[in-house]
Image (cartoon, helix red, strand yellow):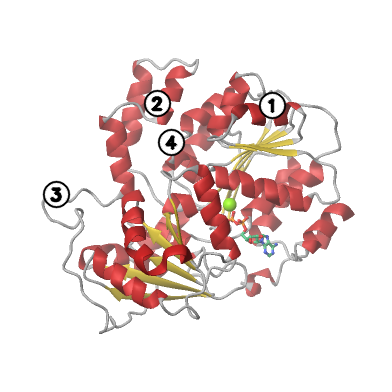
Amino acid sequence: MPQIFLLMSTFQDLNLSSQLLTAIDELGFDTPTPIQQEAYPAVMSGKDLVGIAQTGTGKTLAYLIPIIQGLKYSKQTNPRIAILVPTRELVLQVVENIKSLTTYINLRPVGVYGGTNINAQAQLVQQGCDIIVGTPGRMYDLVVTRALSLKSIQKLVIDEVDVMLDLGFRFQLTNIFDHLPERRHNVMFSATMTEDVDELIDDFFYEPKRIAIALSGTPLDNISQQCYKVENFYTKANLLAHLLRDKAEFGKVLIFVPNKKSADRLYNVLHEDFASQLGIIHSNKTQNYRIRSIEDFDSGASRMLISTDVMARGLDLDKVSHVINFDVPKFAENYMHRIGRTGRAEHEGKSILLYTEAEQEWKDAIETLMDYKIPEMEFPEEVEISKQLTPDERPEEGDTKNPHRNRKAKIRVSGPSTHEKSAKNSKTNQGGSYHRELAKKYKKKKTRGDKNANRGKKRLR
Ligand code: ADP
Ligand code: MG
């Protein structure tokens, strides 16, 4: 997107230390992205900040650069900056980013996340750190076991807050807030503005400055899009296998599926043909497995990665040649998130959408949001049309295909979900009002997408 950078100044124009400038230069960056440009003075000023910008717009450095610039050398044990992110993968990625920005600066980042030995992490924390990056659950566990003190925290960053709330981390966040100094600087970044995000801001932020960059529905100029109308799941799998045989064209392919079940089902089909060229990540895979899958994909050791939406969101993968939308996302905006995984920075990217008759209406919604009709490709004759149906596709037993609805329905009817459990363990009163809150929350119809984008959509009709 070079044209939008035209009016922007360079990193040289920000008042950065020469050590930080050199590190940014070595990363190969010379121009701040719009969100970086706007967030810098806001984060420096100490005013609460909410930054909304599409995936791939450089939000991580938008908060890391001013934070690192503003931190003085210290030997103290307790961290002064806390950064909360929704997944372990993102913890690793943010810590990596901090490390590369502080090649010439003495700063101690520590990343903490669940699924690994807590004692090892407690020891790391107790050796002292300046910036603690973590998932809310693990950070809270370290606080209650007194391995970590948050009393020196000056700035709190919540990144990917929309995903965080979607994963049900609201109560973990609130628990952590209870342990933070009341006087602190709050910064939050999100790709989308949802009702839940808005509520969190109202409850915990003080007159925040709001920066919103691109609309969620803005078509991404450097991504070429195509779609195929396909009979059903297994025919989609046949078509995909057919396309993927062209190794030269399909060099690095990220395949989105709506949920774990579809991910496993597709993996099993494609595995016959592609075996070691194929990776998979979803929330049921162990952390080590996920990390390995991502690393293999990023390094090019595997050519394709199957992922669910939440797992892939916020991940910065290098030079993905194709994004395959194996299903049509029910929230048009998720399509934008998905295709934003390709065409990163200034590389050309390609996106292919496979849709069935039943998914047509969701495709229409996406096209309305983008104000763009996705070019339709002819279904290749040589691809076999399968008569086999998945349980979802059989009319009687089909469960809802919307992963969000599914998950929420489950939370309502079955035993306590993770965050209900942790909420019960917390000190706050979770009597009747808590359950009312929960009921309200899960009955409520969510506004998906950037408010501005929705406004734009209404105008289009
Ligand atoms: P977001 O969190 O908004 O999805 P990221 O922070 O993951 O985006 O950054 C997306 C990609 O853009 C990363 O590969 C990052 O290294 C790159 N990037 C960040 N800032 C710049 C910049 N100023 N110029 C060029 N590329 C950048
Ligand atoms: Mg991000």
Which residue carries the number 1 mark? Answer: 183
Compared to 158, does 277 lie above or below?
Answer: below
Real-space CA distance between mark 1 and mark 3, rounded to the nearest whole angstrom: 54 Å
Does label 4 point to a residue whose CB lies under 8 Å from ligand 2? no
Circle number at residue 168: 4
Circle 4 or circle 3, nearest the eye = 3
Residue 152 visible in rendering = yes
Real-space CA distance between mark 1 and mark 4, rounded to the nearest whole angstrom: 26 Å
Task: Name the quadrant of the N terminus.
Answer: bottom right
Circle 1 or circle 3, nearest the eye = 3
Instruction: From the viewer's perspective, tell me whether residue 333 is left or right of residue 228.
Output: right
Circle nearer the N terminus (2, 1): 1
Circle 2 or circle 1, nearest the eye = 2
Question: Looking at the picture, which amino acid does disc 2 mark?
Answer: Glu
Q: Are marks 2 and 3 in contact (CB under 8 Å)?
A: no
Please report the residue visible at 83 percent of the width from the left and 57 percent of the height from the top. 21
Real-space CA distance between mark 2 and mark 3, rounded to the nearest whole angstrom: 29 Å
Which residue carries the number 2 mark? Answer: 420
Question: Looking at the picture, which amino acid does disc 4 mark?
Answer: Gly
